Image: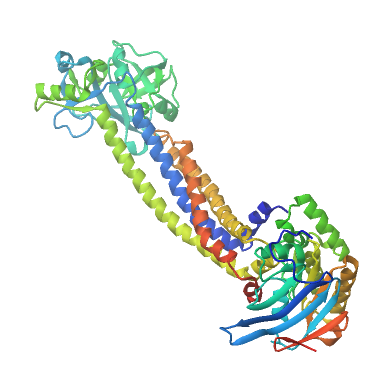
Amino acid sequence: MNNGVEGDKNMDTEENIIEIRNLKKSYDDGKIKALNGLDLEVKKGEFLSIMGPSGSGKSTLLNMIGALDVADEGKIKVAGIDLTKASKLNEFRSKEIGFVFQMHNLIPNLTVLENVEIPMYESDLSTDQMKERALKLLKSVNLEDKRDQIPTKLSGGERQRVAIARALVNHPSIILADEPTGALDSKTGDVILKLLRDLHEKENVTLVMVTHEPYVGKMADRIVNVLDGKIQN
Amino acid sequence: MSYLKLILKNPFRNKTRGLLAIVGIAIGIMVIVALGMVTGGLKASTTSTLKAGAAEISVVQTGSGNYGSGRIDESRVTDLLNISGVKETAGTLRATNTSTSGSSTADVSGSSTGTGTTDTSSGQGSFGGFSVTGMDPDKLSLAGIEDVDGALYSNESTNEVIIGKTTSTNLDKNVGDTINLFGKDFTITGIYETGNFMTDAGAFMSLSTLQNLTNNDNQVSSIAVKIDENANATEVSEAIETAYPNELSTTTAASMASRMNTALNTIDTANWAISLLAIIIGGVGVVNTMVMSVFERTREIGVLKAVGWKEKRILGMILGESVVLTLIAAVVGTVVAVIGVVALLSVYFSGTIEPSFALDIFIRAFVVAFVVGIIGGLYPAYRAARLSPTEALRYE
């Protein structure tokens, strides 16, 4: 795939979309070791749950996969791009990654439709094409009728569905969901999880979800546990 | 939604803060535009005193403090023709006709008083009266009067007068109407326009008539001197003063205009100083507004980075929002200044000073607003663009 991101593409096998070797990340001048030699492989199209207690390093791992942060040591290759060598990380995020946060993080003064359009500003799409694609996504999360609403008028579940539509709008290879049901009641959380799983299957997109709730984790194809910055076997 | 629409939408997320920032900048812009319009109008009027055909030198009595308050023997009008370089001379007598509730007064030494029916002081505001000049009609070009709508008064007439455009407007008088000056009714034979706000706010009549009305027989208050094409105004002026020491003093039109322009340039400098101060205050307001905006939107900026926005797009968005604020302020400030200046000048100066609508005044205002927007938004925009996405997303 020619995704325009500059980096080394000769590191992993074809079937692994994420390949991490001995990844290390520390904060506060090395006093806090968030990741401590972590290894992980994720297959293309897989639904992976990352579980672990607070402070175990699971969110840091997600940030590394999403190129929101850079590693101190080790190798991390995502969607064919060696992130330790890549220079245009914003381009990588724009084309390969869709984020779903615990707090939906929608822009409050923009309408639902405008929020979904936001990730497409770095693309070459016209405003009409952006609108068309955003509407299609809103339809797939059953929020087409809310397109002109502002986020504060929506329920928590609806906001998270908008966030999912926003994450998918650039047709990313991977969806990274950080506790996507953490701020929702269990019933709404189930709806969101089902939606995420359906879209993952329908769009054949790799889904990596951080959660600390076992019943949520069990919905995934595979669960990995992170403890003290490492994957536990 | 286009990127531009997003930029236009964002500054009003916090309406109160946005409006306060706009007011701060608008005050500075208002000062720039208002003072520019007034000083521009005065400058245009000053420039018109140098128009071709008008006298280059004005001769008055030495030691006469006020313009036109001294007296010169009328024989000097012909005597000055003997000075080398003098081409033409014209004696003028200037008197002020003030009237309230129908009474008119000739405000000249040895003046006469009378009663009349026309309130000629209305609309003259702080210029304090209605200036009437006595001058031979064939010499009016030396006063800058080239064309008259209607006809000139005749030299022998005792009841004819021409009035300036501003006077005509202020008094609602036209050719054929009657006007009462110094207690006597005059028929308006013509209306002139020179571009000089003082001249256009007055009236001209026969010199002998005004001399009779104000008991100034054989006396003039000043002599207008037109020089030969190749003559030097300064040298001719010196020659006149040397020929009539302690009797006649001269002022060249160029030096008078220069003095007025110096004064106007001082006002211009003050304009810039006041504007600069206002801009600094407004600029600080913009910086504050944008810094607060970036602080409040830290998580949002983190999201924009997470979805792949480049640093320069975030930088452009914040800078754009800052410029939108200041350009709106420029529009508001300009509109308020134009309405304010036009209203104030029409109420207090009643057309004697015409505001300038020179394009450069408005361009200057908008350029200043744009620059304040860029400078004011630069730091907050840089700060937003350089935010670490993970830190921004963690921001509470």
Position of B59 with respect to B363 (left or right) is left
The image quadrant of residue B40 is top left
Q: Where is residue B384 shown, x and y percent of the image?
A: 58, 65
Q: Which colour scheme is used?
A: rainbow
Q: Where is residue A88 shown, x and y percent of the image?
A: 66, 63
Front-most of A82 and B393?
A82
Q: Residue at x 78, y 50 (%)?
A: A128
> Relative to B332, is B210 above or below?
above
Position of B268 with respect to A77 (left or right) is left
> Relative to B103, is A21 above or below?
below
The image quadrant of residue A195 is bottom right
Residue A23 appears in the picture as rendered: yes
> In the rendered view of the protein, which quadrant contains the N terminus of chain A?
bottom right
> Relative to A47, is A229 above or below?
below
Q: Which residue is drawn at 75% across and 82% down?
A: A39
> In the rendered view of the protein, which quadrant contains the C terminus of chain A?
bottom right
Q: Which residue is drawn at 83% across and 71% down?
A: A206
Front-most of B237 and A200?
A200
Q: Residue at x 40, y 55 (%)?
A: B277
Number of marks in picture: 0
Front-most of B57 and B315?
B315
Q: Where is residue A134 shown, x and y percent of the image?
A: 81, 58
Front-most of A30 and B30?
A30
Position of B314 with respect to B287 (left or right) is right
Residue B102 appears in the picture as rendered: no
> Relative to B222, is B342 above or below?
below
Q: Where is residue B317 shown, x and y percent of the image?
A: 62, 57
